[in-house]
Amino acid sequence: MRDRSGSMLGGLLRASHLVSLEEIPALAAEHAATGGFSQTMIYLSDLRQQSLLPLPGQYDEFGEPLKPIRIDTTLAGLAFRSEETIATSAVSPSESDTAPATPHTDGELQRLWVPLLDGTERIGLLGVTAPGVDEDVRQRAKWLASLVALIVVSKRATSDAYARLVRADRMSVSAEVLWNLMPTSTFANRKVVVSAALEPAYDVGGDAYDYSLDGDILYLAAFDAMGHDLSSGLTASIAMGTWRNHRRQGRDLLTTSEAIDERVGEQFGSSRFVTGILAELDLRTGWLTWVNCGHHPPLVLRRGRPVAVPESSPVPPMGLRTGIAAEPVRYQLEPGDRLVFYTDGVTEARSPGGELFGLERFTDFLVRHEADGLSTPETLRRLMMSILDHQDRRLQDDATVLLAEWRTQRHRQFLI
C-alpha cells in the first residue's frame, strides 16, 4: 500500500507545481491510476453550495461530458454534506439519495465519493473507481483527495476559470469586490471552528465578515453598510480595510472602531454609514471582548440554549462622526459555546405574506441542527437555504452569519 500510495501522491505533488487549474483533472487521473484508481472525477462546489460542478474537460465512462451534481438530492452530494466517504456501485453520479442501494459483489467496480477539504473548508468532491473497496483503498482515496484539494486551493486565486465555474449567476461589481476581500467561509484548528455564510451571494451590497488568527487571539468582525449599491460595497471595503490595518498595528478595538468612523466619514461626508461589531477571543481563556457600533449584539448558544450577554450602551453606526465612543464589553465563554454574529437581513427576512424570519426562528434553527449533529458549515448552508425559501428566494436585504465555536483541550476529549 505504501509503495503504491507514495508513487501516486509523490508523482502528483511533483507534477502539480507548473500546471493550471484546467490541467488538474488530467494530471490527477494519470497519477490516480498508479494508485489503482480509474474514472477519476473532480467536482467543485458552486458559490451557494447547491451544486457540484465538474472541472472542464472531464468525461464519463461513455465519453459524455460530466454533468453537475445536486448537493441535496444525490449520494455524491451526501458525501459533501456529511464530509464522509461514500461508496456506491460504479453507476451514474446522478443516482439519488432515495434510490435503492445496489448490492456489491466480489470483484465489482465500486465508486468512492470523497470530500475535497482544505482544513474544514469544503472545496468539492473527488470521484474514483476501484475494483473492490477495503480500508486500504479508502485511505488511499482520502490521501488523494487531500492532495487534490490542496492543489486546487493553490491555483484558484489566480484562475478566472475557477471564478466562472463556481458561479451560477452573474455577479455584481460590489459582490466581486467584497468576495475578494473576505476570507474563506470556514476555518478550524484544535481550539476553534469558524464558519460564515452570506446571501445574496451574487449581489451582496454592503454586508461583509472577517476573521483572523494571531497566536491564541481570534479576531472576528461583521459589517453592514447602508444601502445596496456600489457605494455600499465601497463603505464596507473601507471599514474592512481600516479594521485590518489597525488590528495589524496592534491597536485596540475601541481605537479601531473610531478609525473606521473617521475613514468612512472622510470618504462620504456623513452621508454613508456602516454598523459593525469588532471582537477578539482569547482561545486560552475563553474571554471575549467586543465593541458594538449600531449592530445587533452577539448571540451565544450554550448547551443548546441562548444565554444572556452584557449589552453596551447604544452607539451610532460608524461613519457619522458623532464623537460618541463605543464601550468595550467583556464576557467569559464556556467550552463548547457557539458565538454568533449576524446582520439584520437574517432576522428581518420577510415572507411574501409579511412574516419575519425572526430571532427566535433563527436561534431555534441553529440549536436544532446542532442537536442533529450537523457540522457548522452544513448548518449555515441549510440556514441560508431556509432564509431564501422564507422570502420566496427574493431577498430584501443582505443576510450574513458568522459563527465561532470555542473548544478547550478538555472539551475536545469529549468531542472525539
Image (spheres, grey):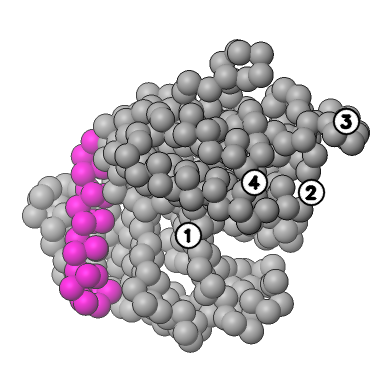
Q: Is residue 151 visible?
A: yes
Rounded to the nearest whole Å, what is the CA distance between mark 4 and mark 1?
23 Å
Point out the tag, 1 or 2, that comes first from the N-terminus.
2
Amino acid, disc 3 = Thr
Q: Is residue 331 visible?
A: no
Displayed quadrant of residue 262: bottom left
x and y, in percent, of residue 232 in the image: 26, 42
Q: Is 72 above or below relative to 407? A: above
Q: Is 125 above or below relative to 333? A: above
Residue 187 disc label: 1
Rounded to the nearest whole Å, what is the CA distance between mark 3 and mark 1?
36 Å
Q: Residues within 10 Å of mark 4 (few under 14, many from 20)?
A: many
Amino acid, disc 4 = Ala
Q: Which residue carries the number 4 mark?
A: 141
Report the number of discs.
4
**Which of labels 4 and 3 is toward the front?**
4
Residue 134 disc label: 2
**Magenta residue span:** 228-255
Please give left or right for residue 44 compared with residue 87 in the image: left
- What residue do we see at 27% from left, 74% from top? 253
